[in-house]
Image: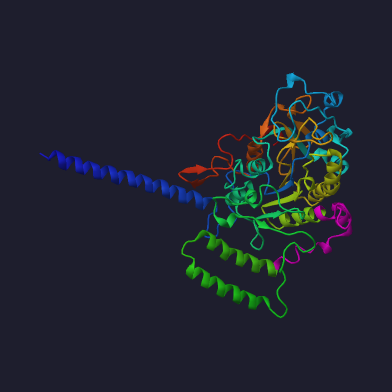
Amino acid sequence: MMHPHHSFAHSRREFLTDAFGGFGELALTSLFADAVRGASDDPLAAKQPHFEPKAKSVIFLFMAGGPSHLDTFDPKPLLNKLNGQPRPSEFGEAKYQFVPKGAKLLGSARTFAKHGKSGIEVSDLFPHTAKRIDDIAVVRSCYCDKVVHSAAQYELFGGRVVPGFPSMASWVVYGLGSESRSLPGYVVMPDPHGALEAGQPMYSNGFLPAVYQPTMLGSGPRPIRNLDLPPGVTPEERRKTVDLIRGLNEANADGDDEFAARIRSHDLAFKMQTEAPELFDITKEKKETLELYGVGTKPTDDYGRRCLLARRLVEKGVRFVVVVAGGGPGNMQWDAHKDIEENHKRMAGQTDKPVAGLLTDLKQRGLLDSTLVLWGGEFGRSPEAQDGAGRDHHNLGFTMWLAGGGIKGGQAIGATDAIGLRAVEEPYHVRDIHTTILHQLGLDQEKLTFPHLGRRERLTLVEGKVIKKIV
């Protein structure tokens, strides 16, 4: 008869063998899944989406500082009627950063009119965008968790109210790779007036590998410095130099993620020097196209150039482009604390024609079907007045819009209450915007994960839902 201890030891070994064999099968299955999705030695190689996508790329027109929904896409006649009066108690309370309790309501001086076949009401701040309204799905019931710029900007880009998490663009490039081998997968074009409250971390790759970080462009006619080869240096000579540097770097990389990303950035820089100068030279565009974006005239020249470049980038396979409107001190953003009229007239004057030009150009070229365009800021503005003529930050209800990329335009969904204080009909958190973007790109939010500190992290936590009415 077998000794009982011997029997126990034998069964324990069998258990461990069976268990680890099972783990091996799971690991092999995961590797096969990666292979099916197009995994390769190049983390930026194009990958297969989880399901059939409607869009291939995204352009986010980020209106930094928080444009007022009440003066743009969400008319409130009752707010005008109650102008100068305290907020009626039946609308509930709201926390603000600067507006004191008991402040008076501020009506809108803007004129709203119905546009397009859809008859959606749009403010007179946007006469050009209004002409494209049948391509646009206006979401009037967005909300987020924080009422300060930095936290709201982190949440808008990364789904969390603190820095350190990957931006939605980094997640997209992690999930899909890039279709271009000579351009970055993820590009940010900041406003030339300066940085924003959340700074560089809101655009960052967070805990994702460094290869998914953004490429930051400058402004003006030459958004990338030193793009041309030095005089007298041939592409072949530069290739030899880059190969030598790469070999030296790889000999000392030792598995360092940041070092590996730097090696790849050198290779990308070389490819851009040899293949991209023509892309960034917009002077070869037709005169009609430049005029469409407002390039060459004030106040639209700067934002028009960047919107035009965004079109050229997605046309060449760049996956995600952020075009920022607003930077530097508060009033240089859509951050209208003192004078909503002066601020929004100026900011809309800089961006309306370029935004409409982008939508028109994408549609004319057959690119709007495959390019998802998102417009909006980190929050809206308060129904109450600040300093008599301004509006404070407001996170309880605001407007964003989407177009292209399989989005059903010509509709306005959701609603805030009668004074624009709170999202009351079909409220959508910014995570729902993220989920909808992923969905249009063919990415399942539950499968797009990355191991971090013992858990499988994802962009949308566990709360995101697709905005089904617009897809």
Q: The N terminus appears in which quarter of the rendering?
A: top left
- Residue 269 placed where, x, y %? 65, 66
Q: Quadrant of residue 263?
A: bottom right
Residue 116 seen in render = no
Q: Is residue 48 rendered magenta in the image?
A: no
Visual colour scheme:
rainbow
Decide: is 329 above or below 105: below
Image quarter of the C terminus? top right
For the image, the number of numbered tags is: 0
| Residue at the extreme left | 1
The residue positioned 16% from the left and 43% from the top of the image is 6
- Residue 339 in the image: state x and y as whole percent: 84, 39
Which percent across, then down, holds residue 87? 78, 23
Question: Residue 69: x and y, percent?
Answer: 78, 35
Q: Is residue 300 magenta?
A: yes
Position above or below: 397 against 445: above
Direction top: furthest residue? 90
Q: Is residue 36 left or right of residue 342?
A: left
Q: Nearer the viewer, residue 93 or 282?
A: 93
Residue reaching furthest bottom? 232
- Is any atom of residue 236 visible in this view? yes
Residue 104, image quadrant: top right
Identity of the residue drawn at 56% across and 38% down: 461
The residue segment tinted magenta is 275-303
The one of 407 and 161 positioned closer to us in this rendering: 161
